[in-house]
């Protein structure tokens, strides 16, 4: 089995997929054989990772076999290897793997879930070597369940297409601490920093939720990654868009959050999709059909109705 055989078998014709296959062929198979959990063992693991029950059964039923699905297994082995070879190294640039063609069916739509399942033992071993509590491990890896649930909500069928993001969890880069996720990172000048990520699951950042989570970051990374030594938190988000102040009150937790940050100079990124997804779990509905229960929901819709746009700005915040 080689990259050309896999490309032909799975009909992976686009330029990105061809380049990915070439990279995987150069990398080769992992040093240890890949093991994919099956049956009840897989069900138990998927449930622990927060995967919805409907998807659990579909994932178990569609799991590839090395003899029956040699092309998928070739991909699985090398995709797993690409993740584990630089465990915990945030200086390595990670390129997200593409989705598989629709003709690969459920096994293809769930392919990156199988990569995740096959890699759980490796990332757990890495966490253990760093003394990371199991509670943090499992709360962090539950990102898989959120990703699978989001795919079904958006597409009406099972699958997962956020492998570019879940790879960071499997590589020992991102950790869930309280309500927030933090990633090992370095700035453009090589200065250590922590990236901040706000998952959709978990509710609004009201009261002290943000700061309670923030205060967990420095002690965690100082203990488990003492060589990193970050003093600053960075992030890019629509939450830092100054236009929010046109709509939300001074007492809004979003405004207090925004004002705590220092903007990083540079052009913002388009943020309409991000704010619609986070606030509404948007799936293409007309603006008139979106709920208008909160001041934020009303602000998002009124702004877009006026023909304006939201933006994501970068900022930094000292770690407490």
Image (tube, rainbow, N blue to C red):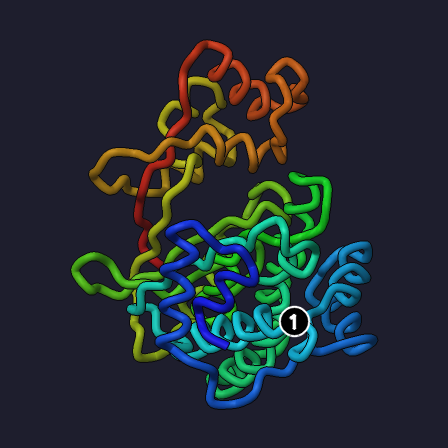
Give how far across and how far down residue 171 sits, in percent: 46, 72
Q: Is residue 277 left or right of residue 272?
A: right
How dense is the environment of label 1, judged by Cα within 10 Å: few (below 14), some, or many (20 and up)? few
Q: Kindly state the secondary structure of the residue where label 1 is placed.
A: loop
At x 42%, y 77%, the residue is 87
Check the image and report above or below for 201 versus 137.
above
At x 36%, y 27%, the residue is 242
Give how far across and how far down residue 260 sits, in percent: 36, 42
Foreground: 248 or 315?
315
The quadrant in which residue 313 appears is top left
**Count of numbered labels shown in the rendering:** 1
* Residue 220 appears in view: no
* Residue 201 appears in view: yes
At x 55%, y 72%, the residue is 76
Q: Which residue is mark 1?
A: 69
Extreme left residue here? 189
Foreground: 163 or 172?
163
At x 16%, y 60%, the residue is 189
Check the image and report above or below for 143 versus 251.
below
The quadrant in which residue 143 appears is bottom right
Give how far across and how far down residue 225 sits, in percent: 38, 77
């Amino acid at each position: 089995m080689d990259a050309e055989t896999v490309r032909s078998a799975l009909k992976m014709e686009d330029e990105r997929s061809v380049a990915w296959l070439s990279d995987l062929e150069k990398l080769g198979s992992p040093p240890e054989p890949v093991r994919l959990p099956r049956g009840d063992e897989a069900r138990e693991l998927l449930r622990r990772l927060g995967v919805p029950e409907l998807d659990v059964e579909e994932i178990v039923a569609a799991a590839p076999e090395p003899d029956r699905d040699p092309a998928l297994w070739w991909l699985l082995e090398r995709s797993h290897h690409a993740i584990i070879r630089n465990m915990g190294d945030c200086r390595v640039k990670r390129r997200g793997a593409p989705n598989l063609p629709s003709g690969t069916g459920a096994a293809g739509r769930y392919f990156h879930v199988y990569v995740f399942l096959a890699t759980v033992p490796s990332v757990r071993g890495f966490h253990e070597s760093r003394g990371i509590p199991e509670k943090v491990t499992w709360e962090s890896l539950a990102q898989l369940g959120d990703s699978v649930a989001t795919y079904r909500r958006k597409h009406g069928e099972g699958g997962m297409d956020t492998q570019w993001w879940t790879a960071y969890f499997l590589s020992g880069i991102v950790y869930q601490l309280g309500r927030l996720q933090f990633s090992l990172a370095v700035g453009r000048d090589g200065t250590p920093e922590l990236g901040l990520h706000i998952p959709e699951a978990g509710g609004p950042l009201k009261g002290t939720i943000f700061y309670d989570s923030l205060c967990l970051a420095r002690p965690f990374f100082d203990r488990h990654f003492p060589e990193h030594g970050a003093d600053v938190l960075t992030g890019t988000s629509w939450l830092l868009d100054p236009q929010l102040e046109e709509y939300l009150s001074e007492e809004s937790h979003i405004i207090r959050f925004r004002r705590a940050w220092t903007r990083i100079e540079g052009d913002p990124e388009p943020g309409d999709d991000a704010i619609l997804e986070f606030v509404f779990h948007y799936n293409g509905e007309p603006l008139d059909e979106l709920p208008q229960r909160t001041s934020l929901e009303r602000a998002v819709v009124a702004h877009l109705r006026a023909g304006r746009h939201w933006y994501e700005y970068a900022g930094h915040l000292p770690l407490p």
